[in-house]
Image (cartoon, rainbow, N blue to C red):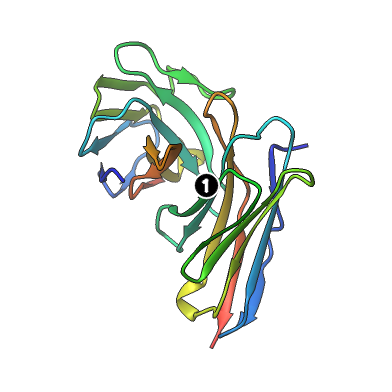
Amino acid sequence: SAVISQKPSRDICQRGTSLTIQCQVDSQVTMMFWYRQQPGQSLTLIATANQGSEATYESGFVIDKFPISRPNLTFSTLTVSNMSPEDSSIYLCSVDSLAGGTDTQYFGPGTRLTVL
Amino acid sequence: QKEVEQNSGPLSVPEGAIASLNCTYSDRVSQSFFWYRQYSGKSPELIMSIYSNGDKEDGRFTAQLNKASQYVSLLIRDSQPSDSATYLCAASDTGNQFYFGTGTSLTVIP
């Protein structure tokens, strides 16, 4: 499976500021995804990061709040803009990899964000 | 109905016992099914995938898929305290979008 890294691993931010999270994969992948996991909750898909075009956002998530870049097949960023305490969460990058003939998602280590 | 549903637990089993985790899914997701393990403060880690009816074994883990009844389960034999984690069931649709359950918390008691 692909090796995925995320930076930063954690951060504490002030209300109203923005944070950019980076996701790096050690091999080229077609699909990259950004998820949010709030405390005690399951995973919520924010968007699919498309290489060479705008990200595809899920219902309830908008580009102005969560701009995403995907400049190449190994890298993506997610920005959390104008943060509020409700944005405190773990943000996870995942990639789609064809493992044993089945499309499978693998996750990065996550970024734990606390907004004060 | 949600695409994937799990009993949130918590589930407690004694060390050495079999832990049984269950998941049901809707008609919308019918391609492949996955079990992830998530330790507290860590990201989900893929344990097993299954897409054919029947059982699939990998070490102490067995995934079972029953498409007629629309359920998938994970059995952990000889449970160890290190198996204590939240287990996420996931399923993909024909567009390869993934849907995750809310997770089942498992505690293995020494």
Q: Residue furthest bottom?
A: B110
Q: Residue A21 location in percent, x, y? A: 29, 36
Q: Which residue lies under the disc numbered 1? A: A38
Residue B73: image x %, image y %?
66, 57
Q: Nearer the viewer, residue B52 or A61?
A: B52
Which of B19/B42 is in front? B19
**Above/below status of A50 relative to A22:** above
Total numbered badges shown on the rendered structure = 1
Residue A110: x and y, percent?
A: 36, 47
Q: Residue at x 42, y 33 (%)?
A: A34
User: Which structural element holds mark 1?
Assistant: loop
Q: Amino acid at mark 1?
A: Gln
Foreground residue among A83 and A56: A56
Spot occupied by residue A84 in the image (x, y as percentages of width and height) = 46, 36
Residue at the (63%, 72%) spot, across then down: B19
- Which residue in the rendered view is the most extreme toward the left? A26
Residue situated furthest top in the rendering: A53
Residue A106 visible in the shown view: yes
Does residue A12 sit above or below B64 in this rendering?
above
Q: Where, quadrant-wise, is the N terminus of chain B in this rendering? A: top right
Q: Is residue A85 visible?
A: no
The residue lying toward the viewer, choosing from B48 and A35, is B48
Vertical arrangement, residue B108 with respect to residue B85, above or below? below
The numbered mark 1 sits on a residue in which chain? Answer: A
- How crowded is the residue under tag 1: few (<14 C-alpha within 10 Å), some, or many (20+)? some
Query: With A27 as the anchor, is A43 left or right in this view?
Result: right
What residue is drawn where x is 44% and y is 52%? B46
